[in-house]
Amino acid sequence: MASLTLKINNKNYTIDADPKMPLLWAIRDLAGLTGTKYGCGIGQCGACTIHLEGTPVRSCSIPVTAAANKNITTIEGLSPDNSHPVQQAWILEQVPQCGYCQSGQIMAATALLKKMPTPGDKDIDVAMQGHICRCGTYPRIRKAIKTASLLMAQKSSSK
Amino acid sequence: METTSKNISRRNFIKLSGITGAALTLGFHLPSQGRDAIFINPSAAGSTNTELNAWISIDISGKVTITNHRAEMGQGSFQAVPQIIAEELEVDLNKVDIVFAVGNSKKYGSQVTGGSSTVRGSYKNLLRLGASAREMLIEAAAKKWNVNQSLCYAENGQVIHKPTGKKLGYGELVEAASKLDPPKNVLLKDPKDYKVLRKPLPRQDNPQKVNGKAIFGLDFKLPGMMYAVVERNPRFVGTVKSVDDSETKKVPGVRHVIKVNRDTFNNMFEGVAVVADNLWAAMQGRKVLRVVWDDTAFPHHSTEQLYDKMRETAKGDIISYRTKGNFASAFDKAEKKLEAFYETPYESHSCMEPLNCTAHVTDDQCEIWGPIQAPDWIQGNLSAHLKLPIEKVTVNMTFLGGGFGRKAFTDYPYEAAMISKEIKAPVQVLWTREDDMSIGPFRPGMVYHCKAGLNGGKIGSFETKMAGQNMGTQEPGADKKGYNDSVTEGLLEPYFNSFPHYSFGDAPLDSPIPVIWWRSVYASTNSFAYESFIDELAIEAGKDPLEFRKQHLWEERYQQLIGKLEEVSGWKSRKKNEGFGVAITECFSSVVGEVVKVSKDANGKVKIDKVWVAMDCGWYVNPDIIKAQVEGSIVMALGAATKHATHFKDGLAVEKNFNTYAMPRINEIPEIEVHIMENEEKAGGVGEPGLPPFTPALTNAIFDLTGKRIRVLPFNLADV
């Protein structure tokens, strides 16, 4: 067991964990943030996606020690009040059905839009095809990413 | 008349759903807080709510709480049930609290969320409950004011006296209203006066599904809760011969290793549970657990053996289910004859949230929390097995990360309860993705043998022999000689009028592989056979496939639907380098037609360009949810048609995770355009009926483009 510090959503969590424990389980069961989901455990579905130093990663596939003292953002850290443009777009386009995969989808979309404020269809395909949605919300995810892009542009032009 | 939610712009969407108070302008604002679904019944002790009926309670401040008695697994019951009640109750849906009911079929009737039954099975009752509660509130106000009740009406959570304009809020009236007898007869609104129903209102559960707040089964925590994973026999029905847990018990955090049973159709399946302080420790302990299974008492099937057997039995005698006239002699005399076999694979449900359940069993009670489609079944099952009075078994539904039929089954809560009972502590049991995908029950694989005769360009005789496992005869001692009445699921009812001679029956396959309903159940596979074969018959008869269907489906409802498909898809003006395919099926009282358009990409590979859908689900609640369900059904059908299947080798499921059970991805999804038919029919299902027509419409389109007929699923689109 190792004692280490996780910096999740600008808050420090001191945890005692098996160094091999995937970051996913440390976030969910030790830090108690359950918005990040377990889907496959082998980096195939994207439900566990979080940002590590701003980059989207599969938290099921990296050991907790690799994330110690680094900046982690989970779905809970996107905004305290659903005010993030991606969250707003997801509601506007009525994306979620069961909702289970959407934390990962939203974290991936957020990272895409940060890197590429106006992504085209091909860019969306590349960034999002690692994410499975069994409910089949894909057409709405595509629309919502474009809507979020517009909302972000509006937000920055109104500043 | 029809509504197409396709044409609703975002601006209109917000305008129609005006009660959200949102506006799409610069710096627009959306409701930031989703209401949190809670699991406690509002009439529980300590609550200030007064119950007007099982679904509706109101507190003295006027806060309305509506109970959703069904599971929310993505299909939208959390929105649909309150949306129906709010219409007649005259309340603002955005100010209502929504809670999940606990399992209680005495209070709520069936809560089994399957068969696309929530709206179609409950809507008349829910409308009446809303109207009846409203009338009681109006009566209470009229009595308080000492005025004629007919001069009072309700609006936006208040009762208003028309002549004077004086008002009383529901909160001020609820106590008096609750003491009144519910009215015997209530007048329900004419659909043309609906203010809440038929509107594409945004879902009430979505705000908490974009910020991580929604509580799914795996997110539920109890103080002192332990975590477990279970090693189950990968050949399903084998028994434990020996267990070596010496290494497991050395893993830090592992507390117990125990044998546990799982009730699957009253057959007890064995497993060994590793219980630990956290999930990761339990999984590590399981990795080094050594279980030796006794697998000698049953056959170890492979996919090849199963399908060889089904192909053979589909040619022979069947258990007859539904017949008319004399198929054999009519077929014998037919001008043209056609015969074909179709095959569909076993499939896993693979909900994004793998199976899990939390249980706390003590000497005198049992409580369950989890992603559960059938709380009342579980309550009955556990009451019987734990020998506890039914009221001592409480079953709570969390949000479900997908269900698709798998979570309507009672085995995983049973297993969790048995572990909790044994270790005398609350426990959460997780099925890893590998467990979830390889342990079943599965959608059964099927083989269909179809024969038909044509006379004068029309179907004169039609026969289908279905071979495959019967979900209904898996219990010990089940009568395996009975017919499977699901053999005609998916086939449009008017065909039974237009076919002069027909015969339908099945040849059941016996196998230890557990099977269960999978979104749209047997219609999900039958429809591929029926709607492919009807297409083949149309070609054989030299007719246009849509025209051919029109000639056999005389009823107005079907003619309207075909007309809609023809119009929106541009069927008649399709170009030479485009393949068009149609299929129309019936599932859970809804009729759905789909047209698929395919073409070839620059490399000569077939690609799916577009799907047009005409959805006739009769009376309906929320057009945007219907559209979403049809989109999702098509994506799920696309996966089962072209991406994945569960195979068996030596009695074991081969595909265990998404690396081998490939899912459709965002880059593979065609444009989908949904049109909802407007009519006076009673409500039909929404969550499943969009699935069955897609696959045959796709393979019919591929035939139209390439001349290649696909009769075995799944197929690789790149190989066509």
Image (tube, coloured by chain):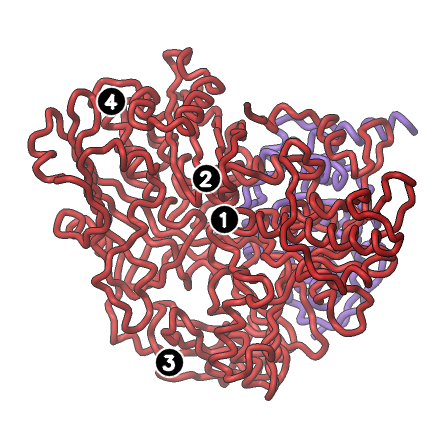
Chain colours: A purple, B red
First in sequence: mark 3 vs mark 4: 3
Q: CA distance from mark 3 to mark 2?
A: 46 Å
Which residue occupies 73% across, 31% down? B16
Q: State the mark number for residue B240.
A: 3
Q: Chain of mark 3?
A: B
Q: Please tell me whether mark 2 sits on a helix, a strand or a loop.
A: strand
The answer to whether one can see residue B370 in this image is yes
Q: Are marks 3 and 4 on the same chain?
A: yes
- Considering only order in the chain, which callout, 1 or 4, is on the residue closer to the N terminus? 1
Residue under label 4: B539
Chain hosting mark 4: B
Between residue A61 and residue B279, name the one nearer to us. Answer: B279
Q: Earlier in the sequence, mark 1 or mark 2?
A: 1
The residue where tag 2 is placed is: B590
To the question of a shared chain for discs 1 and 3, the answer is yes
Q: Quadrant of the C terminus of chain A?
A: top right
Name the residue furthest bottom. Answer: B363
Q: Mark 2, mark 4: which one is toward the viewer?
A: 2
Q: Spatial distance from mark 4 to mark 1, Cα to Cα?
A: 34 Å
Q: Secondary structure at mark 1?
A: loop
Q: x%, y% of residue B554? A: 33, 26
Quadrant the N terminus of chain A occupies: bottom right
Mark 4 in CB contact with mark 1 (< 8 angstroms): no
What amino acid is labelled 1 in the image?
Ser
Amino acid of disc 2: Ser
Q: Pick whichever, B359 or B476, lies toward us.
A: B476
For marks 3 and 2 on the same chain, the one whose residue lies earlier in the sequence: 3
